[in-house]
Image (spheres, grey):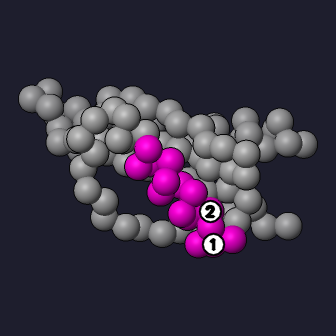
Amino acid sequence: RDVLRGVSITPQPVAQSIVSADTLVAELAHTVREQWKSDLGIAMLATGEPGSDGFTEVRIALAYSNGVEIWERRVEMASDEGWSFAATTTMDQLRHWLGHKA
């Protein structure tokens, strides 16, 4: 059975607060899951503009039938570290989730 089927890239409004960021990234992950009729949905959201240090708060959500898990970190998205965080966190959490389902 396929677990991941596709990707959706949709520009989203900047979340105004931590609560709205968590809600928005969770909704995006659930939307991806439903749109692709998949067991899982993954979403990533920058929760604001970069600060004076160049770092942005980023959230990643993994949605599944019984809920959603969210991870966050401040990263410099203009650097390779930002994208590395996004890819590594997503794959680590996906591996962890799948390991518990086996």
Q: Is residue 27 left or right of residue 91?
A: left
In the shown orientation, is residue 65 left or right of residue 23?
Answer: right
Classify residue 5 by image quadrant.
bottom right
- State the residue at coordinates (62%, 49%): 63
Kindly identify which residue carries mark 2: 33
Residue 10 lies in the magenta-colored region: no
Image: 42 above or below 86: below
Quarter of the image with the N terminus is bottom right
Q: Which residue is mark 1?
A: 36
Name the quadrant containing residue 53.
top left
Q: Main secondary structure of the magenta part?
A: helix
Amino acid at pointer 2: Arg
Element assignment for label 1: loop
Q: Look at 14% across and 32% down and name the residue there.
A: 51
Q: Are marks 1 and 2 in contact (CB under 8 Å)?
A: yes
- What range is drawn magenta here? 23-37
Q: Nearer the viewer, residue 7 or 28?
A: 28
Q: Secondary structure at mark 2?
A: helix
Query: From this viewpoint, is residue 101 visible?
Result: yes
Image check: 70 left or right of 9? right
Residue 31 is one of the magenta-drawn residues: yes
Percent position (x, y) of residue 28? Answer: 47, 57
Q: Residues within 10 Å of mark 1 (few under 14, many from 20)?
A: some
- Marks 1/2: CA distance? 6 Å
Q: Is residue 51 left or right of residue 12?
A: left
- Residue drawn at x 85%, y 42% is 101
Image x and y of residue 72, in percent:
43, 32
The numbered mark at residue 15 is: none
